[in-house]
Image (tube, rainbow, N blue to C red):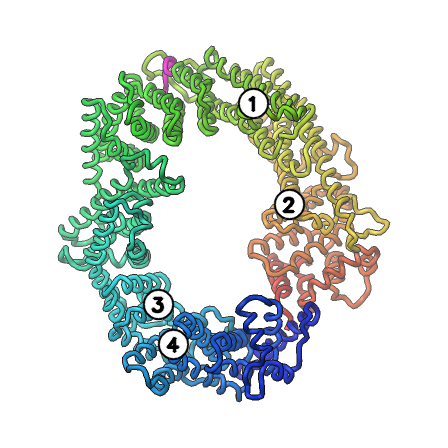
Amino acid sequence: MSTHQSKLEGNQDSNRRSDRQRHFINDHCCFTVPLPQALYIMYLTADKQPTEKLQTLIQEYFAGTNHTACCQFIDAIQRSSEIWEIGISLLDCSLPFSARFFGAMLLHTTLNSASVPPTEKFFMIRERLLTSIVELRDLKSEGTGNISMLLKQLFKALVHLLFRTADSWDSPISFVISHLKNSEFKVLTQQPADSAATDANNFVVCFLSILVEEFSSANLLFHVRQQIKHLILKEESLVFQIFQELMASQTNEAILASVFRCCSLWLTNLSATTSATDCLNFARALYGPINRSEPLFSAGLDCLINLFEEGDFGLSSGRDTAQLLDFHIQKLAGLQPLVLRLVEAHSSAVHRGFHWEEFAQNELMSKTALLLLTLTERQMGNLWTRVLQAGEPHSAIHTLFDMFLFPMSLAGNYPLEESVSDLGVQIWFNVVDALPPICEVPQLNQSTLSFIEDLQCRFLNAAFSKCQFMPDLETFFHRWQSEQREQWYRLRSELADTFLAAYAHQQSLPFFVQLQARLQNLVDRCVMEEAFSDWQELEAIIFVFNSISEQVVHEVAHENHSTSQLASVVLSAAIRLAACMNGGRSIFEGSTMVGSLLCSGTLATLFRNIIPLLEPNKSLLLENDLVGFFLKCLFAASQTKKHKDVANRTASSSLKTIESFIQELPITLTQSERIISTLGVISTGLLPLSVDLEAQLWKCVGLLLPFCGSSISLSSLIHLRLEKTKVNLECRENEQADPSSLHLSRSSKASVVTLFQPFVELFRGVSKTLNRVDNYTCDDAVGPPLPIVERAQIRESISRLLLQLVTYLTQSLADKMGYFDPESIEMVTELLKSGYSACFSSIMENPSILHCQDSLLERTVELTSRLLNYASDQLLPHSLELSWLVIDTLLRNPLLESRFSVGLHLLGIVLQHIDTAFTRLAVSALDSSDPMFDFGRGSCLEHPFPPILMGLRAQDITDQVEACATFIHHVLDWQRKNKESTVEYVCKTCLLNTYESFVGDSTALFWRLSFTATFAGLCLPEWNTVDCCIHLCQRLLTRLNDDNHHDVLPKVITPDFLFEIHAGLLLVLAKGALPRRLVNKYSDLYASLRIFFPDKQFTLLRTLLGCTDHPSDWSTFVSRTPHHQSVTMAVQNAVLRVNLSERNCFARGVTRSAVPLNAVKSAISSFTMACSTPSQ
């Protein structure tokens, strides 16, 4: 496209915009747009000075007193051809600052809006802008701030003038720079030469920076942007020469900092093809002044970070960049003395009690760490290659690797006293990940290997220091903010990952061997002195071995000799420490109580992680009473009134370890009784447990129940919890019935979620134990073996317990259910799901159990029916999930076919509720006066409902539609096991046919209701719902065709149905381009839909799209009611941007059965793109 054409397009765009603005102002504002000549008279005098009216508007603009009038003036004047004359006149240096700034702003915004000045005005505007820029040096009285603001606005106007008139410039950068420098001495005769040159350089840098910034953000057409970029890059050598000269000769730090920033902007936004040689020359100029002072160091770091991160500084240019990378390594290594001074200054500040925010050089340290991180992310492989090839151990590359450790070597605690350790962890991950296997490196010398080992150990020691708790725990837990503690815990978790990553490398083994020796020494000291004065170091060592425990267990299983030795020593020390902490003297008292809690919690976690190492030595469990140690930790933590955060962490670790021991290792009868006794004391204690801890406690109870079902203590514990639940439900029911009881203390009342979560965990624990009971052996257990109660007895006990809970819930629903919110219904669903898993089995049970289960299911059906009756539209999605769980349980059990009819009856009740909910929504939508919902004499309240009607309440029914679609998916997916066979098979039509026969449904309600839910979802704004409903619709249509439902087909695929779905789909597709995955989904939908009456659908689509010249049956159909007429008009208005040929191609592509699926996808993509493309 020629330059003249691009200018013409810009003028046309401007004219269209001007027309729209004029109409808007005339229609909505009291301001009347004057004629151009009137504008000139109103705002400029005969000698081209601003009139009093214009001066008043400018004052009001800056004061903000009449914003509407000012905006109307700006809009009007920008649409006038006199804008250029007014803008030029306001730049007169004799005018006040506000007038000149206003004039520069007018020119900038007008040019930015794609307006192009006439040729005769172009030279006047350019000359006036350049002259105004130079004249600023004489205006010292205005203040530096005002001059800077005006200067930037003038440069922006000049840059956008270049963008709009690029064909009128030959060498714009050299032209502007020469004008700035040459004109400087002509105008500024009173200034010293050095000062004038400094100001000229400052202006040059400011111009280049604004040129790059505005080029990056300007709204330019692609070909215009390419033309401007080519024009600018023709002078790239000049720009680089200016940068290098300024860096080499400039002593003004402010200008140098601006040069650094401008360089990084240029290289990252404009010069994507800069050669490695140019980058090397520029890097030499950059590194020269960077260490002169802290401000220059900060600016240089910003430049380097930006260049390495965005442009990669030419290192990925595809050319020979080895010399350039070596140069960077040498120069970055030369910054080490400055970095070390920063580290020393920070250490001194921490010693004096300074926090990170109070440390003056914290920004420099953060930038240095970020620079090193960026370098490791981009060049780590090349850096390791240089280390492995280096001959001497003290070269620049070794110094640079030493610098990688600096973020982890700072004094103080993260994040309060230092805040770069998290960057140090990321740096080290990059270093370790890129380290090649040493065995694959040819001719590796010993000095390099020693350097790598030393580097690994130095980092791991620094990481070990950072992962230790601070000595003053009172400050950590009570003075630190919770966000700061969470940041520290996140850093500790990341450090655990680094320990695991390092352990995979042989070079780090000396660190872990050393740590193993320190663990032995500390344990010996604890055993001898029975004190935990060094608990921070001890806990940190256990934490490190926790981090690598997974890898250790794996290598021991594969008979790795060195790892087996390490594991043996660590296990022995851990057992000795547990025995010491479980001794007669209590360690959970006194000044070291918190430390003991932390240490014991970490130790319990270690035992849970190394359970496979305990299996060959099961005698250790009883000899050292490890279970007793866990119970002691649990009890101490649960009884601690202070430091609840620490106590909860320790209690949680102990409970999880007890769970793992019960599941993975055989325990004795004595141990189980101790566990039950301790859990009972904690559960019924005065101190309340957190919700999570209580859930873990009851999971332990569930795990033990199949072994200790006859235990009086266990039965008493469950009974007390059951009574507590009943009392709380009655209390809440009374509160609902008698509002005057609200003054009662709420501390004894609990939500449905809190009340039933323990039972959910109890049932889950029972299920886990029952699933592994066949493989359980206790022949090698030490002491009296734990007996296993019969499955049938356990299932009967659980059935009776669940029956009581369901009875309580059903009774509580008798009168009120105001406290049943979505979370409560979800909890009831989880309760039944976990309970059913523990109660029901495919194996033949005793008649007494079957009778109990029948009672349970009967009561559950009653509960479900009441919930459905009480549930509002908002609760319906949650009630449907619960209903399907009950229905599936009733239908699935092959032993009791009598339950099948109950399940089918409940399925019918659920479908009736879905019908009622959709009907209620449709009736509320019909209250609209929109003719689109005027169905005339015909009734639209017969399934399937029109999707457009349901879409009126789209925002309100998203959850309901998705839940209904999921429920129908469940019905279609239903499976069961045959009595005579253990092979599971899919019943494609069995459930649906059986249900229809059972209820005598001759109207195919299920099918029609399903299509209501399906196509309602296709008109909703929630893409997840659309995805689910498209899949369901495809399945329904395929099922109709595969199963040959001749009697159902005419009741569902009616002319009205075809009209509604095609109109609804067209309105959706006409909204614009779709993601690829949805194009695929809609293609599958049309492929399934076109199976039925393709010719009719083709004719209907052409009628809806308005691309048929001959009347047809559909022509009369689409005009029979106001609804059909309005929908057809809406569709045709939505596709106005699509030409008739594209409409025909779409109709043919999605309805003709012979068209391949890829062609359907192409037709949909082309149609949606055409709908979203602006008309030309």
Distance from the alpha carbon under mark 3 to that under mark 4? 26 Å
Question: Residue 261 bears which disc, if any?
Answer: 3
Question: Residue 140 bears which disc, if any?
Answer: 4
- Tag in front: 1 or 2: 2
| Quarter of the rendering containing residue 528 | top left
Residue type pointed to by label 1: Phe
Question: Residue 677 bears which disc, if any?
Answer: none
- Tag in front: 3 or 4: 4
* Magenta span of residues: 666-671
Residue type pointed to by label 4: Lys
User: Which of pointers 3 and 2 lies earlier in the amino acid sequence?
Assistant: 3
User: Which of pointers 4 and 2 lies earlier in the amino acid sequence?
Assistant: 4
Q: How crowded is mark 2: few (under 14 residues within 10 Å), some or many (20 or more)?
A: many
Q: Position of residue 418 (x, y in %)?
A: 30, 47
Residue type pointed to by label 3: Arg
Q: Name the residue under label 2.
A: 958
Residue 670 located within the stretch drawn in magenta: yes
Distance from the alpha carbon under mark 4 to that under mark 2? 65 Å
- Position of residue 312 relative to residue 157, above or below, is above
| Quarter of the rendering containing residue 365 | bottom left
Q: Where is residue 293 in the image (x, y as percent from the top left)?
A: 24, 64
- Position of residue 445 relative to residue 1133, above or below, is above
- Tag in front: 1 or 3: 3
| Quarter of the rendering containing residue 327 | bottom left
526 lies left or right of 159: left
Question: Residue 840 bears which disc, if any?
Answer: 1
User: Which of pointers 1 and 2 lies earlier in the amino acid sequence?
Assistant: 1
